Image: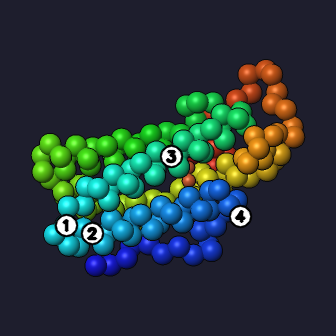
Amino acid sequence: MNAPLTWTESLALNLPQIDDTHHEMVNLINDLAAVLSTDADPLPTFQRLLDHTIEHFGMEERWMAATGFEPDNCHSSQHKMVLNVMHEVVRHATELKDLEPMHIVVGELSQWLPAHAEMMDAALVFHMGQVGYDPATGAIEKPLATEASGISSCGSKSCN
Ligand SMILES: [Fe+2]
Ligand SMILES: [Fe+2]
């Protein structure tokens, strides 16, 4: 078995809630890679990863909503795309008894997470700092403008 991803401080965004969540996701991806190299049923491990990912993305979506992002911004679109793929993996594994997509996705997620964290999540954390948003309390220093000024991009030039 090859561990596809290792947590390092280079993945840290210096916000404990998001760094702990990303560290847990790294561990869950590696758990999945380990079980996929055996004959054991990988579905419970994949389901743990999926449940964790739903929580993870939900947390970031709540922060986006609290700090003025439009609901259909491109960071959220990436989250939706990943969850759609993960639900398809479950459908293939359960209805079609096909584990091939899961084998592909474990490798893709191990590449996707560092890239997404470095670009989308880092931009979100930066924005939260700009508006003085405290994710622990929900307090915000700079009230959001009342006019239509929602953020539909995500602070990244590569976002379209
Ligand atoms: Fe994230
Ligand atoms: Fe994200």
Q: Which residue is mark 3?
A: 55
Tell me if residue 84 can be seen.
yes
Q: Residue at x 82, y 27 (%)?
A: 145
Type of amino acid at the residue the image marks with label 4 = Asn
- Determine whether the residue tagged by mark 2 lies in a helix, strand or loop: helix
Mark found first going from the N terminus, 3 or 2 = 2
Q: Which residue is mark 2?
A: 35
Label pair 1/2, CB-CB below 8 angstroms? yes
Type of amino acid at the residue the image marks with label 1 = Ala
Q: Residue 105 appears at what percent x and percent y?
A: 32, 58
Q: Residue 99 appears at what percent x and percent y?
A: 18, 57
Residue 14's tag is 4
Q: Residue at x 65, y 56 (%)?
A: 17
Q: Which residue is mark 1?
A: 40
Type of amino acid at the residue the image marks with label 2 = Val
Disc 3 crowd, CA 10 A, few/some/many (<14, 14-19, 20+) = few
Mark found first going from the N terminus, 1 or 2 = 2
Measure how far apart labels 1 and 2 are at the Cα level.
Answer: 6 Å
Disc 4 crowd, CA 10 A, few/some/many (<14, 14-19, 20+) = few
Q: Residue 95 appears at what percent x and percent y?
A: 14, 42
Measure how far apart labels 1 and 4 are at the Cα level.
Answer: 37 Å
Query: In the figure, is residue 68 to the left or right of 88?
Result: right
Q: Quadrant of residue 87?
A: top left
Measure how far apart labels 3 and 1 are at the Cα level.
Answer: 26 Å
Residue lying at the far bottom in this picture: please name it: 1
Residue lying at the far left in this picture: please name it: 96
Mark found first going from the N terminus, 3 or 4 = 4
